[in-house]
Amino acid sequence: MTDMTTVLAIETSCDETSVAIVRRHRDSGGDRLEVLSNIVSSQVEQHAQFGGVVPEVASRAHLEMLEPVLLAALEEAAVEQSEIDAVVATHGPGLIGALLIGVSEAKALALAWGVPYVGVNHMEGHLFATFLERPDLEPPLIVLLVSGGHTLIVHLEALGRYRILGSTIDDAAGEAFDKVARYLGLGYPGGPIVDKLAATGDRDAIRFPRGMMDEGLDFSFSGMKTAVINYVRSHPDAADADLAAGFQEAVVDVLVTKAMRAAEQVGAKGVCLGGGVAANSRLRERFAEETEARGLDALIPDRAFCTDNAAMIGAAGLWRLEVDGGHDLDGGATPNLRLPELA
Ligand code: KG4
Ligand code: ZN
């Protein structure tokens, strides 16, 4: 017999308003996660003119878009309200105003529908994106989590048991992409633009330094960004495509080298990618090559599950619901919430 649990999940931590309906099917053969809908409304255009996310603009846009996105998610999933077993929302980390809009909506729906509310850590959501496609994946795993706000190497010892083995000492990887793009006047957000431009450039034309390459598992991207700026100052005619390709190559080189180093250190069998920067073409390519060369099981999630989305929050929420039960409706949002780490 198949046991089904269905959640409605809301993600509003930064600049995407997203609602998903995720269903877990459980039978003697194991678990299977089904994404019935995953609607993402991006605010990128509203922030682009400012060259970055403006918190007030984000809150206002979430407020306007949450209702239509929610209705679209319910319609696409073709589920009745009575089929929803819990309502999940990201409760941190993120922008306080943005988070509160999702959390308040989720708590109101949970109360009105008489089902549990579950608050999910956004980073735990990124970790769970992996299981949307591979619920059979067995820890221990190494997850390289690279987004606009974080760069982490996480040792996932078991579900809910995380150890952070490495993190950035300055800029996050996505932030470095965004800053380099801004300096070159390429637009916002920089990651996807640099990625596209790099495909037309020569990645070996300019060799940028690899920050902290030989030191452990932590990262430093700030110096790499400065190296691009200094290079442009001394070579004003350098082609943007070559700059983009060279910079991307340096970032990817460090990310992949350290993820492989971590996998070796802990004897992981599988290595996964997560976070917005995991959408990067060159990172995906190098990650696949290096894991294959080492005989490691690699999971590179679909691009739609790498950047912020509510389906990953639903996947984490289903698991949290099972281990924690529902969360208190008194709970708020925590902008600097950390990944629940092992001592
Ligand atoms: O995970 P995410 O959607 O939001 C955060 O939680 O931060 O990540 C957004 C970050 C941005 O810095 C963006 O420039 C970067 O991910 N990004 C990329 C690509 N797509 C998004 N970076 C490099 N290459 C890409 N294709
Ligand atoms: Zn994110």
Image: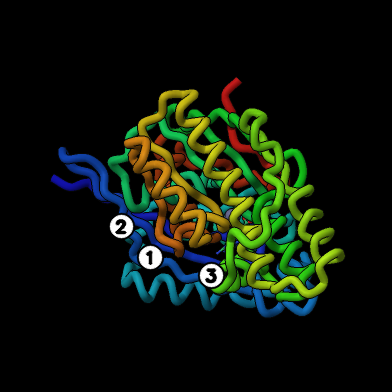
Q: Is mark 3 within 8 Å of ligand 1?
A: no
Q: Residues within 10 Å of mark 3 (few under 14, many from 20)?
A: some
Q: Which residue is mark 1?
A: 81
Please determine whether, in this image, residue 152 is positioned above or below residue 242.
above
The amino acid type found where label 3 is placed reads Ala
Does residue 192 show up? Answer: no
The mark lying in front, picked from 1 and 2, is 2
Q: Quadrant of the N terminus?
A: top left
Please determine whether, in this image, residue 22 is positioned above or below residue 200.
above
What's the residue at 65%, 47% (across, down)?
150
Measure the C-alpha gap from mark 3 to mark 2.
34 Å
Check disc 1 and report its element: helix, strand or loop. Answer: helix
The mark lying in front, picked from 3 and 2, is 3
First along the sequence among labels 3 and 2: 2
The mark lying in front, picked from 3 and 1, is 3
Residue 74 occupies quadrant: bottom left
Q: Position of residue 71 (x, y in %)?
A: 46, 75
Left or right, residue 243 beside residue 281: right
The amino acid type found where label 1 is placed reads Gln
Left or right, residue 186 beside residue 329: right
Query: Can you tell which mark lies on residue 34?
Result: 2
Q: Position of residue 90 (x, y in %)?
A: 58, 52
What's the residue at 59%, 49% (across, down)?
146
Between residue 297 and residue 60, name the one nearer to us.
297
Q: Which residue is mark 3?
A: 199
Measure the C-alpha gap from mark 1 to mark 2.
17 Å
User: Where does ligand 2 appear, by image quarter?
Assistant: bottom right
First along the sequence among labels 1 and 2: 2
